[in-house]
């Protein structure tokens, strides 16, 4: 065999062997993709408009090999954002394999697995996230939290310290360090970390609550009481904001989920953060009055009353027989002090919701202001009879009777309220003051009953002074 023929045969052999290896790898890779390829979740229908169609379109695009990776990423985020978590897990696992250098995929996959308590699976993904995106603070926080829950306290401390290197004073990292301190009974170190955390964010409920416990352990009950006092309304506990997870809002098709996200943002004291989910919700369900109502409240909180009014009026137009929608509009107009618009809204609300005690009460107030006594009386009577546990209408009705020289009718109304609510402070004061103003001989009895009723915050000293000035004697 000559040399040139030998070389040709050798090259052919190399090509054949290489082709076989390539074919084997291609086949193995394709087989792995077939095993990893996420399946289409069950249809949800009208619960999430257009989601089923969008998911099906994405799935069609990544069925064959090589898969359309953009379609796979869209599909996976759609599943995650809309609660189809098993399909989301499969999608993220495939993306981690196909795009090993993108830190989003291990981070988002870990967020689902950690939520299911599968920390042994989440931890390698969280470590990978911090390797790929070392300056992504939330990645380190999530790693620290998972390590702490796995009883790897020393490693958790290291993760939290990495956060502080990148974001000095981060309250979530300081809270994590304090929890690690408590695990090893380092009480003064825990106190120091918690005090730094609340110095950064005085409303940080997790830190305030834990600080109270640490103060008690260190024998400082006064400090513990002060920490608890700073927990407004019992405190609202929050997680560190995660911008990569928040990006999923743009993939959500469920209006209720978006409303819930907006409500959580408001409860966290960040109403501006509620705008994105609400605006997304409106693109999906533009005629859902709940979304317009929530958006109106957020806009008003953000000091945009004109736009808030537009949204609330839209909510009422979409749900005119909803008493709550009507009353929210009335309340907004009262706060913006647009009297003419308020009068129109109350009148329209009473027509749309004739059995609403709250709207009839507002109509009564407006009638009094306009000098329409008989109309006001009818509204107050209706409101009181339909909401007997709320004495506001009864008190206004009694005031109306007193102003129109029907004193006994007014006394009768207040007596009926006290028979039902004997500790109502406002009613006691109104009845006693009426007796003082008119010199009614029954005032002594009314006064004694008020003082003995146990009504909270009763202005006893003021009433007795008024009584003495009117009757020229002290109460015996």
Image (cartoon, grey):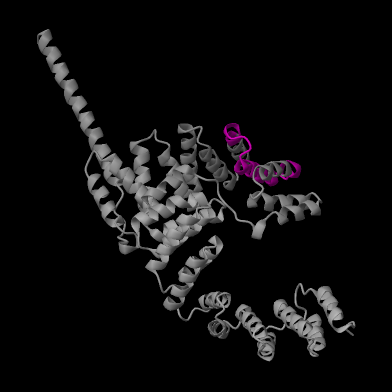
Q: Quadrant of the C terminus?
A: bottom right
> Residue 214 magenta-drawn?
no
Q: Quadrant of the N terminus?
A: top left
Q: Quadrant of residue 402?
A: bottom right
What is the magenta segment's predominant secondary structure?
A: helix
The image quadrant of residue 190 is: top right
| Residue 26 percent coordinates (x, y) | 23, 34
In front: 91, or 389? 389
Left/right of residue 108 with respect to residue 381 in the rendered view: left
Q: Is residue 147 left or right of residue 442?
A: left
Give the residue drawn at x 54%, y 60%: 336
Tell me residue 422's x, y (percent): 72, 83
Instruction: Determine if the magenta segment contains residue 173.
Output: yes
Look at the picture and state if 100 lies above or below 364: above
Question: Residue lying furthest front in this view?
Answer: 371
Looking at the picture, tell me which residue is in the foreground, 360 or 299: 360
Q: Residue at x 71, y 44 (%)?
A: 195
Residue 131 image point, x, y percent: 48, 32
Q: Residue furthest top?
A: 3
- Most foreground residue, 370 or 337: 370
Foreground pick, 214 / 263: 263
- Direction from residue 11 to residue 358 in the image, left or right: right
Q: How many numbered discs, if any?
A: 0
Q: Can I make out residue 261 in this image?
A: no
Residue stretch rendered in magenta on the structure = 162-190
Residue 183 in view in this figure: yes
In the image, residue 120 sits, relative to residue 341, either above or below, namely above
User: Where does residue 356 sit, x and y in percent of width and height?
Assistant: 49, 78
């Amino acid at each position: 065999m000559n040399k040139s023929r030998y070389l040709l045969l050798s090259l052919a052999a190399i090509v054949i062997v290489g082709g076989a290896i390539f074919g084997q790898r291609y086949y193995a890779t394709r087989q792995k993709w077939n095993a990893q390829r996420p399946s289409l979740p069950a249809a949800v229908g009208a619960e999430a408009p257009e989601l089923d169609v969008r998911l099906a379109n994405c799935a069609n695009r990544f069925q064959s090999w090589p898969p359309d990776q953009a379609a796979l990423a869209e599909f996976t985020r759609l599943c995650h954002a809309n609660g189809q978590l098993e399909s989301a897990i499969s999608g993220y696992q495939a993306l981690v394999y196909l795009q090993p250098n993108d830190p989003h995929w291990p981070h988002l996959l870990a967020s689902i697995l950690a939520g299911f308590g599968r920390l042994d699976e989440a931890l390698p993904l969280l470590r990978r996230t911090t390797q790929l995106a070392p300056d992504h603070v939330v990645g380190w926080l999530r790693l620290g939290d998972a390590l702490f829950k796995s009883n790897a306290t020393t490693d958790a401390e290291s993760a939290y310290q990495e956060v502080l290197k990148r974001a000095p004073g981060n309250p979530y990292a300081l809270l994590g360090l304090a929890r690690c301190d408590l695990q090893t009974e380092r009480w003064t170190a825990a106190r120091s970390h918690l005090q730094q955390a609340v110095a950064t964010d005085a409303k940080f409920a997790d830190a305030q609550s834990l600080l109270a416990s640490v103060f008690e352990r260190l024998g400082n009950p006064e400090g513990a009481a002060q920490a608890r006092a700073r927990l407004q309304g019992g405190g609202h506990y929050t997680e560190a904001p995660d911008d990569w997870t928040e990006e999923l809002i743009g993939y959500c098709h469920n209006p209720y989920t978006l409303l819930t996200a907006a409500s959580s943002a408001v409860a966290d004291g960040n109403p501006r953060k509620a705008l994105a989910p609400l605006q997304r919700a409106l693109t999906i369900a533009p005629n859902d009055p709940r979304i317009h109502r929530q958006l109106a409240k957020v806009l008003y909180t953000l000091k945009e009353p004109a736009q808030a009014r537009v949204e609330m009026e839209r909510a009422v137009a979409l749900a005119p027989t909803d008493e709550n929608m009507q009353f929210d509009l009335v309340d907004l107009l009262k706060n913006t002090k647009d009297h003419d618009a308020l009068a129109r809204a109350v009148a329209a609300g009473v027509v749309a919701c004739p059995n609403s005690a709250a709207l009839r009460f507002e109509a009564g107030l407006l009638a009094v202001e306009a000098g329409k006594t008989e109309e006001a009386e009818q509204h107050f009577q209706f409101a009181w009879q339909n909401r007997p546990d709320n004495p506001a209408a009864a008190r206004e009705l009694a005031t109306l009777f007193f102003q129109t020289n029907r004193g006994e009718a007014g006394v009768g109304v207040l007596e009926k309220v006290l028979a039902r609510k004997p500790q109502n402070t406002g009613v006691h004061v109104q009845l006693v003051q009426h007796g003082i103003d008119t010199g009614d001989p029954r005032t002594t009895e009314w006064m004694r009953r008020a003082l003995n009723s146990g009504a909270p915050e009763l202005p006893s000293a003021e009433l007795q002074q008024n009584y003495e000035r009117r009757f020229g004697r002290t109460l015996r």
